[in-house]
Image: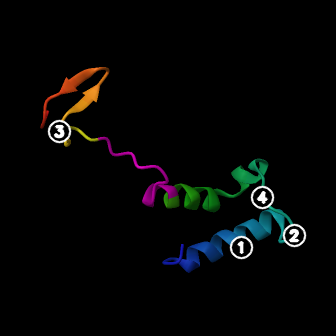
Amino acid sequence: MTFFPDAQKTAQAGIDVVVGSDCLPTFADRDSLPYTKTLAKEVLRYNVVVPTAIPYRVTEHGWMLHSKRLPDNT
């Protein structure tokens, strides 16, 4: 969000219009805030919280899986 402050300002303006500046949005307000909902999805898509890459071959010597040794580079 530091690279795109205009996007953050637009989302904040939408929140202020829908729920006001005195309270926080709830899940009931989600359908009324399409820009904010889309922005949150884009932020999570751009920088995921949990790594999703799965190694596709053994990189360490002597790796075990369910009491069986997996050969190197398999």
Whether the residues at callouts 2 and 4 have beta carbons within 8 Å, the answer is no
- State the image coordinates of residue 7 (x, y, percent, origin top left): 57, 73
* 4 or 3: mark nearer the eye: 3
The tag on residue 22 is 2
Location of residue 15 (image quadrant): bottom right
What amino acid type is highlighted by mark number 3? Answer: His
User: Taking 38 as reference, is 32 left or right?
Assistant: right
Q: CA separation, marks 1 and 4?
A: 12 Å
Question: Would you name the residue on which mark 1 appears?
Answer: 13
- Residue 28 in the image: above or below residue 19: above
Whether the residues at callouts 3 and 2 have beta carbons within 8 Å, the answer is no
Question: Would you name the residue on which mark 3 appears?
Answer: 61
- State the image coordinates of residue 17 (x, y, percent, origin top left): 78, 68
What amino acid type is highlighted by mark number 1? Answer: Ala
Q: CA separation, marks 4 and 3?
A: 51 Å
What amino acid type is highlighted by mark number 4? Answer: Pro
Question: Would you name the residue on which mark 4 appears?
Answer: 25
* 3 or 2: mark nearer the eye: 3
Q: Main secondary structure of the magenta part?
A: loop
What residue do we see at 41% from left, 49% from top?
51
- State the image coordinates of residue 42 (x, y, percent, origin top left): 50, 59
**Among the two numbered marks 4 and 3 on one chain, the one whose residue lies closer to the N terminus:** 4
